[in-house]
Image (cartoon, rainbow, N blue to C red):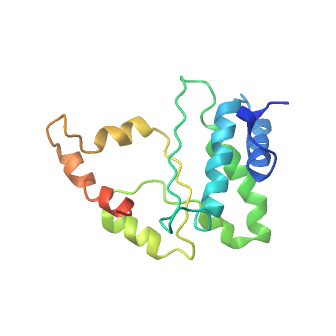
Amino acid sequence: MPTFLGMPPGLMRDVASFVYHAAPYPNEAIAAVAGMGFVAAIVGRSHNINGLGLNQYLLNVAPTGSGKEQAPNGISRLLTPLIASFPLIAEIRGPGEIVSAPGLHRALATRSNPSMLRIIGEAGLMLSQLPCALRPASTAARRCRPLRPAMTPW
């Protein structure tokens, strides 16, 4: 049985274990990150510092063929039976892609719970489009610039 990076017993470890055992190529670290993200999306609004909310960014960096897809696939497999009993849990999954600040505001404003779990398949591509002080501003960077203030509480 994997130790899941020393995770304490509880819901987070249970989710990580489910994701791990449902994967065709199990990877303990990827399953642990899936468990952390899933539970953070559920409890994020009630567990925070100074009322600022819980902004958690988790990133799996692994080579091709290492099973990175087990996180979104495992969470989907976990959510499917839960939705029948708890329909609002379907809202935990956020939009796949946010391309503008108004789009982010709309995504948050139409939810009964503003906490969400967003899984980005290729974070490197998304990060390469964000503005960077060390490179000239590109069209994509100017388009993404309004997202930073929308996602940052200060």
The residue at the far right in this view is: 1
- Residue 54 is left or right of residue 25, and the answer is left
| Between 23 and 153, the one nearer to me in the picture | 153
Residue at x 73% of width, y 66% of height: 83
- Residue 119 is left or right of residue 67, and the answer is left
Pinpoint residue 54: horizontal percent, then vertical percent: 53, 59
Residue at x 55% of width, y 61% of height: 116
User: What is the quadrant of the C terminus in the image?
Assistant: bottom left
Pinpoint residue 142: horizontal percent, then vertical percent: 19, 51
Residue at x 71% of width, y 28% of height: 25
Pinpoint residue 68: horizontal percent, then vertical percent: 60, 33
Q: Is residue 4 above or below residue 112?
A: above
The residue at the far front in this view is: 50
Residue at x 61% of width, y 25% of height: 66
Q: Is residue 138 above or below residue 46?
A: above
Q: Say whether residue 100 is visible.
A: no
Pinpoint residue 40: horizontal percent, then vertical percent: 62, 55
- Residue 153 is left or right of residue 132, and the answer is right
Q: Quadrant for residue 100, please give it.
A: bottom left
User: What is the quadrant of the N terminus in the image?
Assistant: top right
Q: Say whether residue 118 is visible.
A: yes
| Between 39 and 74, the one nearer to me in the picture | 39
| Between 1 and 93, the one nearer to me in the picture | 1
